[in-house]
Image: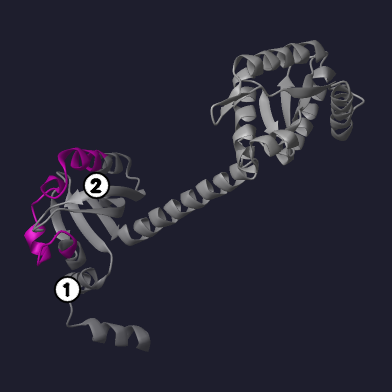
Amino acid sequence: MTKASASSQDFFKDFSKENLFRILLNQVDYSVCFKDKDHRYMLCSSSFARLLGYKTPDELVGKDLSSFIPEDDAKEHTECEERVMDSKTPVLHLEKHLELSGARTTLETIWLSTSIYPLIDEKGEVRGTWSITKDISEEKNTEQKLMQKNKQCDELNSRIQVLSTIDEETGLYNRKYFEEMIQRNMRLFSRVRGRGYSAGFSIILMDIDHFTKLCTDHGAQKREVILQYVADILRASSRSADDVFRVGNDEFALLLSDTGITGAKVLAGRIKSRFLRTPLVIDDKTIYISLSFGFSTFEDQLDASELIMKADQDLFNAKKER
């Protein structure tokens, strides 16, 4: 026997193994407990007793889990212990959100993380289970607060992203988003055409005829009223698949999916008719507002700027004819 081992034996000679085990059991921060095959507590750490509101671990002996938590949760945990005993395989870090009662004067809902192990004797027979439980409520609360903050940040970012595409005065999409959507549709329909399908899209550029005179005649403060009226008419006249944009001071645009030049001109005719049927009324005065239109249709050889330029030139020619 070495001097070190002899010294160790002398140190522990006045302690039984059971006493040493209980000293260790009652000092650890984790909650430790041992159960028999009938799922009754046989031995528990002091921290586990405190978790359930008891003064001493001995008060838990002979009780089962249904004394402390709702019946459904107790049944689920008991079934898990049965699987551990049958398979002799531990279940690690089982997290549960539980409502504890026990000897507490009030109910408390906490998060617990439990690892359950088979309790095997020296003959290799399963005698029950033993487990280590940790109160992880603080970590979970922090995690939930962080998730809530992340959700709020995501919502804020989504809101910012939406606002960056919207024209504040009319609520329509803005020019930046118009150009982005043209690029997106060009990529989409280029791929579709590459598979042998005949598909495309058109754009319509529009501006309000005599807009400056309208504002002068009816007051600059009516400018927003006129713009919103035009925006509402365009929304009401377009299809659900169409996108409506305000792309300049008195300039608007429509992006029409799966639509050729003929379909675009048919839609323009509907828009003109709606303006005639539903004139704007300002200060009891009926005002008939009209738009000029320019058209272009996506072709493989056009890029976004050429597509817009073509519609803009068509719009310019239409205004010259008025």
In three-dimensional space, the C-alpha distance between marks 2 and 1, rounded to whole angstroms, equals 24 Å
Quarter location, residue 235: top right
Vertical placement of residue 72 versus 298, above or below: below
Which segment is the magenta one?
50-79
Q: Is residue 53 left or right of residue 235?
A: left
Residue 104 horizontal/vertical position (percent): 10, 58
In the current view of this chain or complex, which residue is farthest to the right?
Answer: 301
Question: Which of these two is toward me, 240 or 251?
Answer: 251
Mark 1 and mark 2 in contact (Cβ < 8 Å)? no
Residue at coordinates 79% horizontally, 33% vertically from top-left? 183
Q: Is 68 covered by the magenta stretch?
A: yes
The quadrant in which the N terminus is found is bottom left
Vertical placement of residue 116 versus 218, above or below: below
Identity, as a three-letter code, of the amino acid under mark 1? Asn
Question: Which of these two is toward me, 319 or 92?
Answer: 319
Which disc is residue 126 wearing?
2
Q: Is residue 165 left or right of residue 102?
A: right
Q: Is residue 119 left or right of residue 54?
A: right
Quarter location, residue 317: top right
Question: Which of these two is toward me, 110 or 314?
Answer: 314
Residue 231 is at least partly visible in this image: yes
Give the colour scheme shown. Answer: one colour
Residue 24 horizontal/vertical position (percent): 24, 72
Q: At numbered mark 1, what does the secondary structure look like: helix, strand or loop? A: helix
Quarter location, residue 6: bottom left
Identity, as a three-letter code, of the amino acid under mark 2? Val
Residue 125 horizontal/vertical position (percent): 24, 47
Which disc is residue 19 wearing?
1
Residue at coordinates 64% horizontally, 36% vertically from top-left? 218
